Amino acid sequence: MSKHHTVVLHDIRSMDDVYAQLARQLPLPAHFGRNLDALFDLLTADLEGSLTLNWPDAADARPYLGADRHAALLTTLRDAADERDDLHLRIG
């Protein structure tokens, strides 16, 4: 039976916050790099089992991350969700 993971991101003020919260909530591989390419690889290939990722206050992170980084993070998450049927995003 495959494991189901649930991640809740909250109070994101930097990309370090994103990676730290993921590290606390998921079994990250030792080779995980703290960048968007590594995040995509984690979500599409390295993480076994289904995943629900909740980010209810995503809009609040935009001023902290900057518009470009915020958009890139959301694109990475959505692209990963497009790659696998068992990755569900709930972005607020």
Image (cartoon, grey):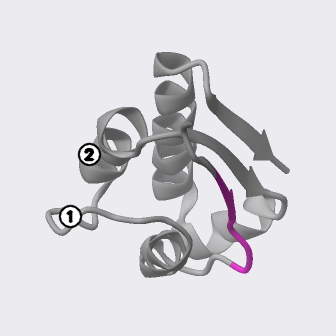
Q: Is residue 73 left or right of residue 91?
A: left
Q: Is residue 2 left or right of residue 59?
A: left
Query: Residue 51 location in percent, x, y?
Result: 61, 43
Amino acid type for the residue under numbered disc 2 = Asp
The relative height of residue 64 versus residue 75 in the rendered view (above or below) is below
Q: Pick the residue in front: 9 or 44.
A: 44
**Which stretch did the figure color magenta?**
5-11
Q: What residue did someone put label 2 on?
A: 37
Q: For label 2, count other residues whose C-alpha is less than 10 Å away and answer few (under 14), some (14-19) or many (20+).
A: few
Q: What residue did someone put label 1 on?
A: 33
> For residue 11, what is the image quadrant?
bottom right
Which residue occupies 64% across, 76% down?
12
Which residue occupies 75% across, 58% down?
55
Judge whether residue 22 is colored magenta.
Answer: no
Label 2: state its secondary structure: helix
> For residue 58, what is the image quadrant?
bottom right
Query: Are the residues tagged 1 and 2 within 8 Å (C-beta)?
Result: yes
Q: CA distance from mark 1 to mark 2?
A: 8 Å
Q: Pick the residue in front: 9 or 14.
A: 9
Q: Is residue 37 left or right of residue 80?
A: left
